[in-house]
Every structure is written in structure tokens, then in C-alpha cells.
């Protein structure tokens, strides 16, 4: 097979979240560009559930032939293996191809919650310990850890409500069933513009160019607070190095294209 030019057929890209989650949007943004460079389609295969473990386990067990890849955030690869028994070892069972993007989380509230700032939220939570709820994409998901870090650094008691994925968590946040949550910025922009959600603070040390008027959580009263998410592409371990290199080069070329960069911004 090594004599055959890779890729010779479509490539399946497992995304470890349901349709509409940030890793899914990321995958669907880059797939056409990478497909164009490689000359074969990248077919996105959503395998959500268990905080991303279902998709990661499938990818870890796939044939290392370059025709099954994984796009994941840290949750399933670096967080959950420390919280529960998983069938794979991230460092042993995956070969990294490349980083796609990284970005800070955004602290959000439903407009019905009577807070306008990070300080307001901390004050309200302190006055009602254990009464306020927050949503996450699942136990051990990066936005779950973001809020637990926020709770630790501010000393507030806000109750965790885990969901099967970010789209479900956001749906109940927008619906007002759960009034607080962290999420990536890009998918939240339409909700912010429509007034369905309120942005209290960005979880990076510098303000986001997408939301220049929203203060960082650090400058809003929680010094040094940072919580970000990244998305990367991986292959099963033992995939031939020439295939990893080909995929990595295609990914870099796609990410450097002005069209893709403007879509990410």
C-alpha cells in the first residue's frame, strides 16, 4: 500500500461532540479547504456523548491508515482520563497532526438573572449559596472545569448541571432553565446580538477582538483568571509518518488561507 498515493479515498473525521458544538463547527469550517488540498473529501462523523469519550475511543481503535481521524478539544484527551477509567492512553494511542485553533471561554448569563457584571454575579452567588445553577457540556468538559476554577477563585457555591454536549447546555441557557454557563465565543455571537444571552466576562488575560467592549474576568475582579479551549486534529498511533506529514501540511495550508482565517475570526 505504501506505493499508493495517499489519500486514495474519502477520509472520515470523527468529531467527538453532537452537531452544532464548537468542535463540530470547527471541523466543518476546515473540512472543505483540507479536502481541496488533499483531493479527497473529509467526511465529518459526529459521535457525541460521554464528554467526547465515545468519539475518542472509536478513533483510538481505528485502523492507522490515515482514513480515520479525530478532531477533539482537551476534554476527552487530557481531562477525562484523569477522572475515570478509559480504554485508551492519549499519548500512546494518538499521533497529533496539528492544532486548529484555541480561544478563551466567555462567562454568560440569561438576561433574567439580575446581574450586569462579574462582580454582580459573585455578589448574587454569595448571597444565595447553592441556589444558582450553571450548565456545562458534561462532567469533565473544559467549560465544566472553567466554572469550577471560577468557583475556587471566588469562593462562590454554584451548582453544576452537566449536559450531553454544548448545544444542549446552550439551549437551556438561552431558554433560561439554567441561568449561567461558560462557552466558546463564536457560537454565542448570534445569541449575544439578539439579546438572548448576556456576556459578563472573557476568560483570557487580554480582551477578545470579537468582543472588545466585554471586560476580561481578570480585570473584572478575579485577577489571573484564565480558561481556554483548543481544537486539534489527531490520527490513531502507528499511522505512517508520511501520512501524518501530508495531513499536517494540508491543515497548516488550510489554516493559513485568508478565507479560512476570516471565517474563524
Image (cartoon, rainbow, N blue to C red):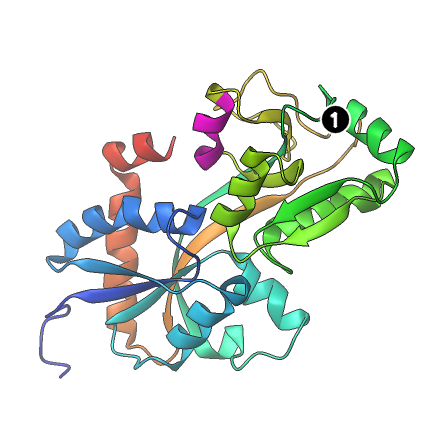
| Near-viewer residue (132 or 202) | 132
> Residue 51: where, in percent of width, then height?
54, 62
Residue 149 vertical placement versus 111 (above, below):
below
Residue 148: in sight, yes or no? no
Mark 1 secondary-structure assignment: helix
Asked whether, in this view, residue 131 is left or right of residue 69, the answer is right
State which region is magenta: 186-192
Does the stretch in magenta take in 202?
no
Is residue 191 toward the left or the right of residue 3 in the image? Answer: right
Quadrant position of residue 207: top right
Give the camera-side residue of 131 and 67: 131
> Among all residues in the image, which is located at the extreme top?
213
Residue at 39 percent of width and 30 percent of height? 265
Q: Check the image and report above or below for 109 versus 243.
A: above
Residue identified by numbered label 1: 118
**Picture residue at 60% right of the left edge, 52% below the top:** 142
| Residue situated furthest right in the rendering | 127
Q: Position of residue 233 (x, y in %)?
A: 38, 59
Q: Quadrant of residue 245?
A: bottom left
Residue 170, horizontal then vertical, whole percent: 53, 41
Where is residue 205 drawn, in percent x and y?
Answer: 65, 31
Residue 169 shows in the view? yes
Labels in figure, total = 1
Report the residue at 13% width, 84% height from top. 1
Magenta residues: mostly which secondary structure? helix
Q: Residues within 10 Å of mark 1 (few under 14, many from 20)?
A: many
Q: Name the residue: 53% across, 82% down.
A: 87
Amino acid at each position: 500500500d505504501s506505493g499508493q498515493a495517499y489519500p486514495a479515498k474519502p477520509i472520515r473525521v470523527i468529531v467527538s461532540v453532537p452537531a452544532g458544538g464548537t468542535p463540530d463547527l470547527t471541523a466543518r469550517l476546515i473540512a472543505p479547504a483540507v479536502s481541496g488540498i488533499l483531493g479527497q473529501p473529509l467526511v465529518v462523523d459526529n459521535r457525541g456523548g460521554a464528554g467526547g469519550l465515545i468519539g475518542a475511543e472509536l478513533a483510538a481503535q481505528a485502523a492507522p491508515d490515515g482514513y480515520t481521524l479525530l478532531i477533539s478539544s482537551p476534554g476527552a484527551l487530557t481531562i477525562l482520563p484523569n477522572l475515570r477509567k478509559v480504554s485508551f492512553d492519549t499519548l500512546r494511542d494518538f499521533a497529533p497532526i496539528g492544532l486548529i485553533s484555541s480561544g478563551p471561554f466567555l462567562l454568560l448569563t440569561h438576561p433574567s438573572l439580575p446581574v450586569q457584571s462579574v462582580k454582580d454575579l459573585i455578589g448574587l452567588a454569595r448571597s444565595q449559596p447553592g441556589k444558582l445553577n450553571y450548565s456545562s457540556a458534561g462532567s469533565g468538559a473544559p467549560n465544566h472545569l472553567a466554572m469550577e476554577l471560577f468557583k475556587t477563585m471566588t469562593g462562590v457555591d454554584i451548582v453544576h448541571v452537566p449536559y450531553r454536549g454544548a448545544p444542549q447546555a446552550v439551549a437551556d441557557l438561552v431558554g433560561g432553565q439554567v441561568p449561567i454557563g461558560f462557552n466558546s465565543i463564536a457560537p454565542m455571537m448570534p445569541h449575544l446580538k439578539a439579546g438572548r444571552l448576556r456576556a459578563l466576562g472573557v476568560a483570557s488575560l487580554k480582551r477578545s477582538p470579537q468582543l472588545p467592549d466585554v471586560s476580561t474576568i481578570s480585570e473584572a475582579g478575579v485577577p489571573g483568571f484564565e480558561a481556554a479551549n483548543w481544537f486539534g486534529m489527531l490520527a490513531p498511533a502507528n499511522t505512517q509518518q508520511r501520512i501524518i506529514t501530508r495531513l499536517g501540511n494540508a491543515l497548516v495550508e488550510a489554516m493559513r488561507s485568508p478565507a479560512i482565517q476570516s471565517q474563524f475570526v
